[in-house]
Image: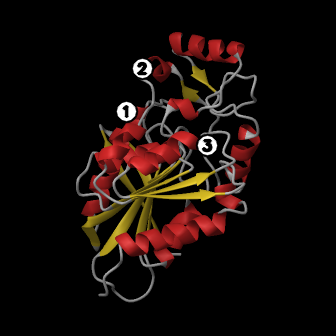
Amino acid sequence: MNREDLSFSVDGDRCAAWLYRPQGPDRGTIPIVVMAHGLSGTRRDRLGPFAEAFSGAGFAAMAFDHRGFGDSGGELDLFHPRRQREDWREAISFARSLPGIDPERVATFGSSMGGGNALAAAAADSRIAAAISQVPFLDIRQAHRAPLKASARMMLAALLGRHMPAVGQPDEAAFINAPGGESGWRRVVAGGEDSRWRNRASARWLLSSPFRTGHHAARLHCPWLVCVGDADRVARPGPAIAAAKRAPLGELVVYPGVDHFDIYDGPGHEALVRDQLDFLGRHLRPRSG
């Protein structure tokens, strides 16, 4: 594996990143896939195997941590969707500046809420060549409907400016409290690479406009691969399927029996990676050196 530790700055805070480059002879300028989790997930939480697969196929890949999470600087556990999209904008700009990278062949890639951010980042940048959203959380309507008491505790935490667990049980005030969600995510973290993940994120953003990045789909300029598990209970698949069908260049793949976290190590993982490599090969094909 040819991986380099890098960092870039967003409003004076350092964002940590890993850059994966293809091994072998000089290929000239090559495409790059910019990658991140959503919410509190970090690059160490099984983004590496995807990046390794991409670099093995001839693409560079850069996985980064948002400010406040993982190895990045900034206020710990401070979360806001707008703030993460600012990180995406700077990550893409930084990736374009790297030696040997073709600045016109940049793709965005995200999981869960990161899939929503990957869509939004691509829609905001007319130079983005392609986007991938896996098990995407694009709309608050996809969330598990928590019991009333849990929902009330979540809103109280937001009103008081407190933090909440990122994952929890269905009766708990947590951002992800779908059945099986906590055990699924903790399995991902346990299988990661010396994870820096913390089960904590600020809640005040719940008082702002609802998270809805799916509205970008209808006017997205580039090819967009949407990978959906039909058994997903964390990000219910209906709104993501509808968004993929609205996108002019949308490509939808639905994986039967696959839940939100199966894509990292479950039965759908290998098929999903094959589909992503095929998509990148068609829309971001490397040029020979």
Residue at image mark 1: 82
Work out how far the residue at label 3 is from the one at label 1, CA to CA, in angstroms: 21 Å
Q: Nearer the viewer, residue 261 or 240?
A: 240
In the foreground, 12 or 38: 38
**Residue shown at the point (26%, 70%) measured from the top left:** 102
For discs 3 and 1, the disc positioned in front in the rendered view: 1
* Cβ atoms at labels 2 and 1 below 8 Å apart: yes
Residue at coordinates 76% horizontally, 40% vertically from top-left? 180
Residue 71 visible? The answer is no
Q: Nearer the viewer, residue 245 or 65?
A: 245
Answer with mark 2 or mark 1, whichever residue precedes in sequence. Answer: 1
Three-letter code, disc 2? Ser
Q: Which residue is mark 2?
A: 208
- Above or below: residue 268 compared with residue 140: below
Q: Provide residue 84's location: percent of width, then percent of height.
A: 41, 38
Q: Is residue 20 above or below residue 95?
A: below
> Residue 237, how many percent across, how many down?
59, 44
Q: Secondary structure at mark 2?
A: loop
**Quarter of the picture holding the C terminus:** bottom left
The amino acid type found where label 3 is placed reads Trp
Label at residue 197: 3
Q: Is residue 267 left or right of residue 109?
A: right
Q: Residues within 10 Å of mark 3 (few under 14, many from 20)?
A: some
Residue 239: x percent and y percent?
52, 40
Quarter where residue 284 is shown: bottom left
